[in-house]
Amino acid sequence: MDFTVTESQTLIRQSVKDFAEKHIRPYVMEWDEKQHFPVDLFHEMGKAGLMGVLVPEEYGGAALGYHEYITAIVEVARVCGSVGLSMAAHNSLCTGHLLQFGNNEQKKKWLPKLATGEWIGAWGLTEANTGSDARRMKCVARKEGNHWVINGAKNWITHGISGNIAVVIARTGELLDSHGITAFAVERGTPGFKAGKKENKLGMRASETAEMIFEDCRVPEENILGKVGEGFIQAMKVLDGGRISIAALSIGIAKGAYDAALAYSKQREQFGKPISTFQAIAFKLADMATEIEAAELLTHLAAHMKNHGEKMTKEGAFAKYYASEVAVKTATEAVQIFGGYGYTKDFPVEKFYRDSKLCTIGEGTSEIQKLVIAREVLNN
Ligand SMILES: Cc1cc2nc3c(=O)[nH]c(=O)nc-3n(C[C@H](O)[C@H](O)[C@H](O)COP(=O)(O)OP(=O)(O)OC[C@H]3O[C@@H](n4cnc5c(N)ncnc54)[C@H](O)[C@@H]3O)c2cc1C
């Protein structure tokens, strides 16, 4: 693996940083407090190439690789975790699923809208009673002539209300049969497809999370992604790549919290000197810096393998597991360094603290990452 930061990564870092300072930072707390999902921002992000980072140019995307994708998400999440989460879900889950498993017609139909940010994408695997145990899903699709009729609900879906199109993973065979599950693309406005409850969350409040409900929702046969029965295997592959994006999101949040804590520690004085001169504080900063660097290296390792088309289930889980735990630890220590001020909304670290916790839960909890890693190491 080459550790040199490429010219394209440097350019992306600077341009995304400038974009986030102008279009995101001034509104972060307002969106968080109102739990406002800023749809227009995502249209702007589309114009800047941030909604189809991995999509080839022929489908309107930026045609970049995973290293650049990580760089972009880190710079967005450094300013706002919610926007980083929505960007990651749009690019890796909905768009990523269509890119990997859509046929040429499907890609031509939907990817240009998603990659340019004209449309926002959602991806529904989780249900109220099946999160980690997704294979036990109850949402069913039944064949009727040239159509499939979907009944059930998907919960905790990023862009479950505002998504213009959703990739929906539904049961088409026997319960617990991993080949009895199929992926469908369902456009907003399809009769029988409606949004349900919007979640009121601890963090990531500007990223919309909601239920999607399907009541006799008729979807044409041509909206099946890949073949009938391949949906669960496809979803697991999509999540392998998605974990790189959640690791990047975690690194961005950790860096945002670390930047704030570092600056504050040099300026805040107690006992007549900056608190950074106390070893207890300096060692916290040393741990944060080391762990962020390690998380970034693990994430770029998974990215390197993904770029080269190698199987990276273990490395993706390493990156997601480690980086998300680092995000939570770093944000917690940042609040500690800020003392009482860290516990208020006048400083940014309380938000990083709240946002960071999603990273150890979404796209597979830390416990599930350990199951994946254990399975991989025990089988080798
Ligand atoms: C903000 C947000 C956005 C989301 N966006 C999406 C989305 O866009 N699309 C989507 O499909 N889903 C989405 N999700 C759902 C998310 O992927 C699930 O919440 C996650 O997979 C965990 O499932 P669960 O919440 O049902 O927890 P559960 O699976 O019920 O887990 C509860 C606890 O039990 C532990 N546990 C479960 N099984 C085991 C086991 N075998 N061994 C050890 N421990 C275990 C878990 O680690 C956890 O600590 C989102 C969730 C959130 C909070």
Image (cartoon, rainbow, N blue to C red):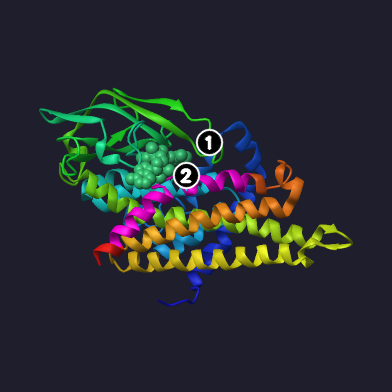
In the rendered image, the quadrant that contains the C terminus is bottom left
Q: Is mark 1 within 8 Å of ligand 1?
A: no
Query: In the visual, does 6 lie left or right of 305?
Result: right
Q: Looking at the image, which residue is at 61% across and 63% down?
A: 288
Q: Foreground residue, 348 or 91? A: 348
**Which type of secondary structure does the marked residue at label 2 adopt?**
helix
Q: Main secondary structure of the magenta part?
A: helix
Q: Residue furthest right?
A: 272
The amino acid on which the numbered mark 1 sits, given as a three-letter code, is: Phe
Q: Position of residue 63 (x, y in %)?
A: 38, 60
Marker disc for residue 37: 1
Q: Looking at the image, which residue is at 24% across and 35% down?
A: 170
**Magenta span of residues:** 351-376
The amino acid on which the numbered mark 2 sits, given as a three-letter code, is: Ser
Q: Looking at the image, which residue is at 38% across and 35% down?
A: 164
Q: Position of residue 176 (x, y in %)?
A: 20, 39
Q: Position of residue 2 (x, y in %)?
A: 43, 77
Query: In the visual, does 266 lie left or right of 75?
Result: right
Picture mark count: 2
Contact? badges 2 and 1 (CB < 8 Å): yes
**Which type of secondary structure does the marked residue at label 1 adopt?**
loop
Q: Looking at the image, which residue is at 35% across and 39% down?
A: 131
Q: Considering only vertical position in the picture, is 200 above or below 310?
A: above
Marker disc for residue 86: 2
Q: Position of residue 342 (x, y in %)?
A: 71, 47
Q: Please identify the quarter of the rendering in which residue 205 is found.
A: top right
Q: Is residue 246 magenta?
A: no
Q: Is residue 365 magenta?
A: yes
